[in-house]
Amino acid sequence: MWGRARGCRCRGPYSCRGVTAAPRHEGSEMAEVLVFHHGYGLTAGVREFAERLRRAGHTVHVPDLYEGQVFDSLEEGIGYAEKAGFDTITARGAAVAERLPAELVYVGFSLGVLPAQKLAQTRAGAKGALLLEACLPVAESGGAWPQEVPVQIHGMDADPFFAGEGDADAARALVEAATDAELFLHPGDRHLFTDSSLPSYDEQAARQVTQRVLGFLDRVK
């Protein structure tokens, strides 16, 4: 049931499914990235995003935290996460990270920010964090933001989730507190605009996110 990608060192029930990591060339200095999916589950759009990073030469791990389930609506997906427990979803992400090197860049899409931000704040060795369409108050994820960890945050300025539920405020506070932090507010009201497989996808804004993400990875690798 649980496949493991060639070149991926994930093991266990939350290993990467159907993902092939880019081969590393001897002497290359590319980032190693751990991507956590959003509330729908591990969609084709999240896989496509990971593949873009992989084509740029980075090693990318994309674990499935939903035990193989992808939902047709965000409400259904969040319902699954609530039933499983958000702490359980975060713990599944942490279990994957423990089987990988410490020097990771953590990427979270919306719900996936829960494990991504937690690990970036609390697991020693993090190279960076990319928080897409969500951000938590730093106090909820393990205290102060580690000053050696750069972070980049993206969201839409009228997204009812990101802008309307406090995430944008948490992102601004994080940018103020961190040594190396960027917040990009894209015009629009869509949530999960970065997922090409969803109706909420915004191609132009998503392209800008990908360009800035790749620039971030080139800088921190």
Image (cartoon, helix red, strand yellow):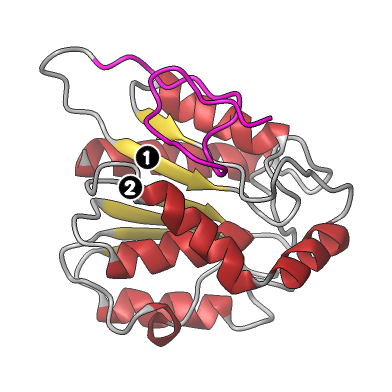
Residue ID for mark 2: 105
Q: Residue at x 34, y 27 (%)?
A: 58
- The answer to the question of whether label 1 and label 2 lie on touching residues, with beta carbons closer than 8 A, is yes
Q: Is residue 81 left or right of residue 74?
A: left
Badge 2: few (under 14), some or many (20 or more) residues near its Cα, within 10 Å?
Answer: many
Q: Residue 163 in the image: x percent, y percent?
A: 64, 75
Q: Is residue 135 left or right of residue 25?
A: right
* Label annotation for residue 33: 1
Give the CA distance from mark 1 to mark 2.
5 Å
Q: Residue 32 in the image: x percent, y percent?
A: 31, 36
Q: Residue at x 30, y 40 (%)?
A: 217
Span shown in magenta: 1-24
Quarter of image, res 49: top right
Quarter of image, res 68: top right
- SS of the residue at dot 1? strand
Above or below, 100 relative to 140: above
Any part of residue 66 in sight: yes
Amino acid type, callout 2: Val
- SS of the residue at dot 2? strand
Amino acid type, callout 1: Val
Residue 179 belongs to the span the image colors magenta = no
